[in-house]
Image: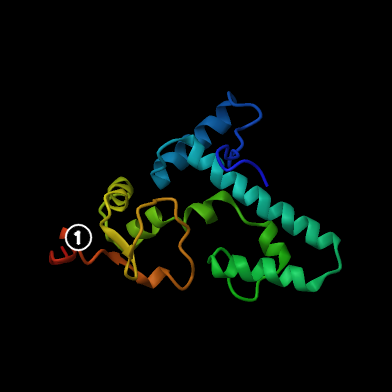
Amino acid sequence: MGDPKRQRKKWRGPRHPWRREVLQQELELLGKYGLRNKHELWKAKYIIEKIRYQARRLLAMADEERRCQLIEKLVKMNLLPPGATLDDVLSLTVNDLLERRLQTVVYRKGLAKTIHQARQLITHGHIAIGDQVVSCPGYIVGRDEEDKVCYSPRSVYASLPPS
C-alpha cells in the first residue's frame, strides 16, 4: 500500500527530453489547453498510457466482463462514445483527455473568454459542478456532469448578465 506521507509520482517525463519535435509538440499543447507546466501534460500522457496498457492486457485475456468494465468507465468519463470497442480505447490520444479537463470545458462552454481565464476562474472558486465548487482545473468532467458546469451561486459572475 505505501506510506501515506510519501505519495508516488503520478507522471513520467519523456525518455529523450531535448528532441526538437517533442519540445514543439509539448509547447503547442501547453498553449492550446492552458496548462501550467509540462508536469500536467506528462500526467495526462501517463493516464492515457495506463489506459492503453490495460486495454492491451484485456485483449490478450478472454474475460469479456473486464473489457466491458474498462469501456464503461471510459464512456462515463466521456472519453469514448457509447458502444465503443477496445480498438477505440487503443486509439485514445492525450488530446482526448485534455479536452475533458474542467479548464477546457469551462472555456468551450463560453464561461471564460480565454483558456487562461478559465483556469483563473476555477482556482478562485467561481466555477461549480451542480452545487459543488470545484477548484481543480485538472478535474476530469464526466458525461453526466458536463451540463452541470456553471458559475458558483456565490460567485460575482453568477449575477452578471451574459455578454
> Residue 152: where, in percent of width, then height?
25, 63
Colouring scheme applied when the structure was drawn: rainbow
Amino acid type at image mark 1: Ser
Task: Look at 44% across and 35% down and name the residue there.
Answer: 37
Tag 1: Cα neighbours inside 10 Å, few (<14), some, or many (≥20)?
Answer: some
- Front-most of residues 139 and 90: 139
- Compared to residue 145, the image places residue 136 above or below, namely above
Which of these two is toward me, 31 or 141? 141
Compared across the picture, whether 128 is left or right of 15 comes to left
Name the outermost residue toward the left: 160
Residue displayed at 35% across by 53% down: 135
Q: Is residue 24 above or below residue 88?
A: above
Residue 139, percent from left and from top: 45, 55
Q: How many marks?
A: 1
Could you say where residue 108 lies in the image, as x and y percent from the top left? Answer: 35, 60
113 vs 43, left or right, is: left
The residue positioned farthest toward the bottom in the image shown: 83
In the current view of this chain or complex, which residue is farthest to the top? 18
Residue placed under numbered mark 1 in the picture: 155
Query: Which is nearer the eye, 8 or 51?
Result: 8
Q: Residue at x 34, y 70 (%)?
A: 130
Q: Residue 82: give x, y in percent of width and height.
A: 60, 75
The residue positioned 55% from the left and 47% from the top of the image is 44
Q: Secondary structure at mark 1?
A: loop
**What is the quadrant of the C terminus in the image?**
bottom left
Q: Relative to residue 76, is residue 134 drawn left or right?
A: left
Q: Quadrant of residue 91?
A: bottom right
